[in-house]
Structure formats: C-alpha cells, structure tokens
Image (cartoon, rainbow, N blue to C red):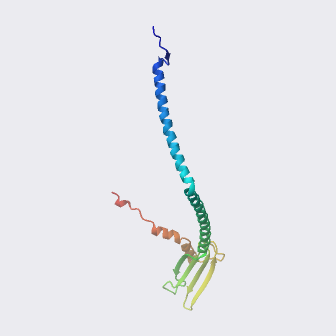
Amino acid sequence: MILYAKAFGMRIEIVIGILLALIVILAILLIMTFRKLLDMNRKYYTIMSGKKGKDLEEIVFTRFKEMDKVKAMAKRVSKEHREAKAHVDSCYSKIGLKKYDAFNDMAGELSFSLAILNNNYSGVVINAMHSKEGCYTYAKEIIKGESYITLSEEEKEALKKAMTVEDEIALLTTPIEDDSYDI
C-alpha cells in the first residue's frame, strides 16, 4: 500500500510543484530587478564620472548662481516698485469739478470749485467765484478727505466727485448684463 503525504489538504507532490513554480517566478523577477539596478548604476556612474560629471556639477552651480542673481533682482525690482508706488500715491490723480453761478445776477456758471487729490485723498480745493467786479479765488487744504476750514456746498460736491472718481470710472467700464438677449 502506498501512503501519500498531505500538506494543506493536498498531496505533497502538488504542493512541491506549486512551490517550485513560485521559486522560478521569483528567480525571474529577481533577475529582472537586478538587470534594472545594473542599468541604473551604469547610467548614474556615466553621469557622475569623468567630464560629464564635472559638467553636471558646473551646470548645477551655475544655475544656483543664476537663481541668486534672480532673487537679488527680484528684491531690487520690489524695492523700486514700492518707491514708484509711493511716488504715484503722492501724485494728484483724482479730480472733481463743480460749476455754478455764485451770484444771482450772473449766468453761465462761470464760477467753479475744483478738488485735486492724491491717492491718500489729500490735496486742495480751489474755489473761483466770478462776479461783475472780478474773480475771487480761494484754496483750502484737504488732508485725508477732510478740510479743517468749512467747505461750501459746491466745494463739498467737488470733493465728493474727486473721492469717487474711481467708482464712476468702474461703473462706466463694467459690462452691462442684459437678460433680454438670452436664448
């Protein structure tokens, strides 16, 4: 009588056959991995050795020097931008004009109030009142949108126009959405 040894509920010959097949597959995978490792090692040594390695090292150091120059240039440009922005903020760029008749016996709105401000809402309001006897001109200093001297209604309106000129420009340049053309 022949006795069969069993492992895992199978005959031992089948288990050994499966294990041998797994060993062969693992050996093939090991050989493939080893070949890839050798190929990578060869490429690494080609890049890092001899003239090519020195060239790569020089390229890396050159790029780092260029990056340092770019950083320095960016700092310089940023500083120049801040200086230019401070200069632009101090320039008069906001203007409001209100024309009116200063006296009842005059017509044609020959009198005016003119507000001239910078980005910080500081500047001057000039008021010119025209009469039959002549033209009288007054200037009032504006600091951060306010005057320490009482302003007339016309001067207040000119100041308000100057302070909201950007809002008015935005309204004029904003595209209008019209639902009447929806398809």
Provide residue 36's location: percent of width, then percent of height: 50, 43
Asked whether 169 or 42 is in front, the reply is 42
Q: Quadrant of the N terminus?
A: top left
Provide residue 136's location: percent of width, then percent of height: 59, 87
Q: Residue at x 46, y 23 (%)?
A: 17
Asked whether 101 or 15 is in front, the reply is 15
Residue 104 located left or right of residue 79 = left
Q: Quadrant of the C terminus?
A: bottom left
Provide residue 55's location: percent of width, then percent of height: 56, 59
Asked whether 130 or 94 is in front, the reply is 94
Provide residue 93's location: percent of width, then percent of height: 56, 75
Name the outermost residue toward the front. Answer: 50
Name the outermost residue toward the top. Answer: 1
The answer to whether 104 is drawn above or below residue 45 in the figure is below
The answer to whether 172 is drawn above or below residue 12 in the figure is below
Name the outermost residue toward the left. Answer: 183
Q: Residue at x 54, y 52 (%)?
A: 46
Name the outermost residue toward the bottom. Answer: 133
Q: Residue at x 39, y 62 (%)?
A: 178
Q: Quadrant of residue 96?
A: bottom right
Could you tell me how many numbered marks the image carries?
Answer: 0
The answer to whether 47 is drawn above or below residue 68 in the figure is above
Asked whether 178 or 91 is in front, the reply is 91
